[in-house]
Image (cartoon, rainbow, N blue to C red):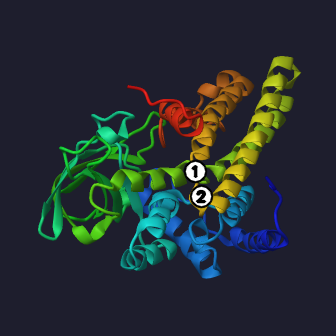
């Protein structure tokens, strides 16, 4: 498979680099991590800049290769991350672009691209664990609306979101994966209650969402009723496909910074640490090549990432944890000081083998969809 870039793609890279070099020095300082209204405004402002410059739709209207170049260059330049926009730009938006009707695309995609609306993801539930298909949030049809009752958890940025990509059970009597429907729910609808959750790192980017007879228009259904599991697999393929690509670039940058710090504090003299950092360098180089391979495969198959995203997600989750464990080795006792670089990131890395599908789920996907092994009973 050819992993090289075409002249047109390299021209896109050069133009993007030039724009970033001109725009980034003029950005205002980022707000406090705990100031979610401020972070929402900052992230939407960055998205508007991207829109005005013609880069807003790169996450779903451009080819996967251009999307990869965009993520690589913005991360290398230190541009703002998508932040509060990540569900809309990287999950819900691409799903609606791939599965939505013309009216749905016209309603929801432009506000995401212009930096006007924020989305959150209502998938996980307290009683379902890592078994997403075990969700129990009910949606009963009542005329031209679904009446939704249930609870969602780990809902990122729910307190500042305008919309929620919501999974509900519309047919309790159907097979486990067959009675699920994908809805777009307005977060200001009567009956929606958001309760922020504080993480181990002290931040509150997650929330628990309680739904008490919330009416969601049938027109907000993406895909057919009871076909939500298939639509969800499209969403998750984007989540596990190129969504982490920028983070691989960030991890490679952190790895270089760790080597510099180790030379300064004397820990570079430890041959075991040098071997560990060298192994991580090889790991992240391989992950970047795997990302390029997945992108090339997506180009050939219609621009939706495939099961190869699970291979990437599985390895990346553990490599990220290994990276920040190595950071703790470099810092020594200072790794317990949360004001030191990499200390908070180490705590955050613990979630990566759970978020976006646990490692156990990824093992099952790889076994069944790539290796062709029989499903467990």
Question: Where in the figure is residue 281, as x and y percent of width and height?
Answer: 80, 36
Residue 271 position within the rendered picture, expressed as x and y whole percent measured from the top left:
86, 19
User: Separation of disc 1 and disc 2 at Cα?
Assistant: 24 Å
Disc 1 and disc 2 in contact, CB within 8 angstroms = no
Residue 270 in view: no
Q: Which mark is residue 81?
A: 2
Q: Quadrant of the C terminus?
A: top left
Q: Tell which circle, 1 or 2, labels the residue nearer the N-terminal end.
A: 2
Q: Position of residue 17 (x, y in %)?
A: 78, 69
Q: Does the rendering let one see residue 181?
A: yes
Q: Quadrant of residue 313?
A: top right
Front-lying residue, 122 or 326: 122
**189 lies above or below 270:** below
Nearest the viewer among 258 and 354 is: 354
Q: Residue drawn 72% across and 50% down? A: 293
Along the viewing direction, whichever of 237 and 355 lies nearer the viewer: 237
- Residue 199 lies, in percent from the top left, at 42, 37
Which residue is pictured at 70% across the width and 66% down the height?
A: 66
Between circles 1 and 2, the one closer to the viewer is 1
- Residue to which mark 1 is pinned: 306
Say above or below: 250 vs 321.
Answer: below
Relative to 308, residue 326 above or below: above
Name above or below for residue 50 compared with residue 132. below
Is 102 situated left or right of 6 in this image? left
- Disc assigned to residue 252: none
């Amino acid at each position: 498979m050819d992993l090289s870039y075409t002249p047109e793609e390299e021209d896109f890279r050069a133009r993007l680099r030039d724009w970033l070099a001109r725009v980034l020095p003029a950005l205002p300082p980022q707000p406090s991590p705990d100031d979610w209204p401020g972070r929402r405004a900052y992230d939407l402002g960055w998205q508007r800049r991207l829109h005005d410059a013609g880069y807003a739709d790169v996450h779903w209207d451009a080819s996967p290769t251009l999307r990869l170049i965009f993520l690589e260059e913005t991360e290398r330049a230190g541009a703002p991350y998508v932040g509060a926009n990540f569900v809309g730009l990287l999950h819900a938006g691409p799903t609606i672009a791939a599965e939505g009707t013309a009216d749905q695309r016209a309603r929801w995609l432009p506000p995401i691209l212009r930096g006007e609306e924020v989305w959150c993801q209502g998938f996980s539930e307290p009683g379902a664990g890592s078994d997403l298909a075990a969700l129990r949030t009910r949606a009963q049809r009542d005329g031209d609306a679904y009446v939704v009752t249930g609870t969602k958890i780990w809902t990122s940025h729910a307190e500042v979101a305008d919309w929620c990509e919501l999974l509900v059970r519309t047919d309790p009597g159907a097979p486990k994966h067959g009675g699920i429907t994908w809805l777009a729910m307005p977060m200001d609808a009567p009956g929606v209650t958001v309760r922020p959750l504080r993480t181990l790192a002290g931040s509150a980017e997650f929330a628990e969402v309680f739904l008490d007879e919330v009416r969601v228009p049938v027109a907000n259904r993406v895909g057919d009723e009871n076909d939500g599991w298939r639509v969800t697999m499209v969403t998750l393929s984007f989540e596990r496909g190129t969504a982490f690509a920028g983070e691989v670039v960030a991890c490679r940058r952190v790895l270089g910074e760790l080597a510099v710090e180790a030379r300064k504090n004397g820990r570079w003299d430890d041959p075991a640490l040098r071997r560990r950092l060298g192994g991580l360098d090889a790991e992240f180089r391989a992950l970047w090549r795997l990302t390029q391979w997945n992108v090339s495969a997506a180009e050939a198959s219609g621009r939706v990432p495939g099961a190869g995203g699970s291979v990437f997600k599985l390895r990346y989750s553990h490599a990220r944890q290994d990276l920040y464990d190595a950071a703790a080795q470099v810092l020594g006792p200072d790794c317990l000081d949360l004001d030191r670089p990499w200390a908070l990131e180490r705590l955050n890395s613990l979630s990566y083998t759970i978020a976006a599908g646990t490692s156990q789920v990824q093992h099952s996907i790889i076994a069944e969809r790539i290796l062709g092994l029989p499903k467990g009973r």
